[in-house]
Amino acid sequence: MQPTRRTFLTAASGLALGTRLAAASTQGANDRIRIGVIGTGGRARGLMGQLKAIRGVELTTLCDVYGPSLARAKEHAPAAAHVADYRRMLDDPAIDAVLIGAPDHWHRTMTIDAVKAGKDVYVEKPISRTIEEGEAMVQAVEASRQVVQTGTQQRSWSHFTLGKELLDSGRLGQTTFVHTYWYQQPGSIASATVDTAGLDWKAWLGPAPARPFDPERLLQWRHFWDYGGGGFTDLLTHWIDVVHWYMEVEAPRSALATGANHLRRSWDAPDTCTASLEFPKDFSTTYIGSFNSRTDDGGLEFRGTEATMKIDRRRLAVYRNDAPYAPGTHAPEPEIYVRGGADGTIAHLQNWVDCMRSRKTPTADIRTGHMAARTSHLANIALREKRRVTWDGTAVR
């Protein structure tokens, strides 16, 4: 059978991914890298499960102030030691690197402490809780010799890499509009239980303001300003990093945002929000998000003068503007369709490990992570100050 353009791209992208992973798995496979994990919540445990499958990696030490999370993490690393204070982990010369899965309000302190202690770092996104925190992190990391990977894993995902290649090829024409969205449905706090006997609440708060224990703040911390930045920093950060990467920009010129708490009235951050971002290079970006339904999940649409590309974590599709609509629809059949394949986080972690061995710059370095978080922070500033804000490269206006 003669291969079509669509099947060729699907096969080619899969072959490229397989080649990269095969090369990565053999590079320095006998050089053991010993990693400690700081904060062992659900995301960190997922990363641990993927890290332990990488040859030459050993999860040696775990740190968490909540006992039940630590107990679940030990299933991934039963032989790992436990320390109550993450700084004891940084004092250990046998540990080469740390994975930081703690809440956002700890990212700055832990990352800076880690690189000063000579440890390489994987820090989840968003890397910071404010623009100023991110700037301090960039300065500290770039003054060190440490390898720091940030958790925007789309940059290591094969079909996202293909999307960048397609956009650069001119296939879309001039892209003037990027639409991004994410819809989720978090669980109810009413059904959750917290083992307060196994929690050091004061240590969990750390640099955040002192407050009485609140189970919702512990379990859904992303939606409280003391610890996170709501939907913009948690979700928009992923997509805006793709926008920065594809469109070769570092920040928007301006941001305007709205939001409301229609269902989750106890949250600080809105459960429904929108942002409008104006960028250099003559294009605009929007974000729409809500926490009332998971239908459609999240994705991006790059709309150009020649074609539209829709991409998410499961697929990439390109639709030519001059193609006839499919019967009964307002869209043509896709000219190119590629399934997403394996979780890009696996390749992202492998890239971190490879760069720890080679001392090269990782795919999503600290400056890349800072720029993505910064745009989300600008959206939050516009939201909270109820005005259009501008960014001149150095300050918010």
Image: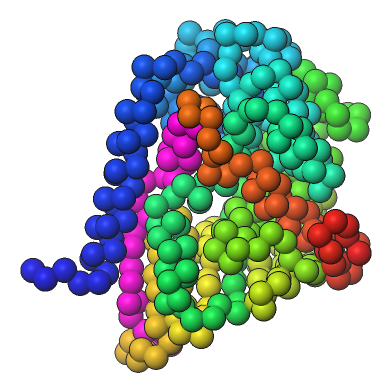
- Which residue is nearer to you in this view: 243 or 300? 243
Residue 320 relative to residue 15: left or right: right
Residue 135 relative to residue 327: left or right: right
Residue 236 relative to residue 246: left or right: right
Residue 23 spot, x, y in % from top left: 32, 36
Magenta stretch in the rendered image: 329-355
Q: Give the quarter of the image for residue 174.
A: bottom right
- Which residue is nearer to you in this view: 186 or 109? 109
**For the point 59% across and 72% down, which residue is it?**
178
**For the point 44% across and 56% down, which residue is it?**
161
Residue 75 spot, x, y in % from top left: 47, 18
Magenta segment includes 330: yes
**For the point 66% across and 67% down, which residue is it?**
287
Residue 368 visible (yes or no): yes
Residue 75 visible (yes or no): no
Image quadrant where one finds the C terminus:
bottom right
Image height check: is 166 above or below 303?
Answer: above
Magenta segment includes 260: no
Q: Give the quarter of the image for residue 258.
A: bottom right
- Which residue is nearer to you in this view: 248 or 385? 248
Q: Give the quarter of the image for residue 314.
A: bottom left
**For the point 61% across and 42% down, which residue is it?**
365
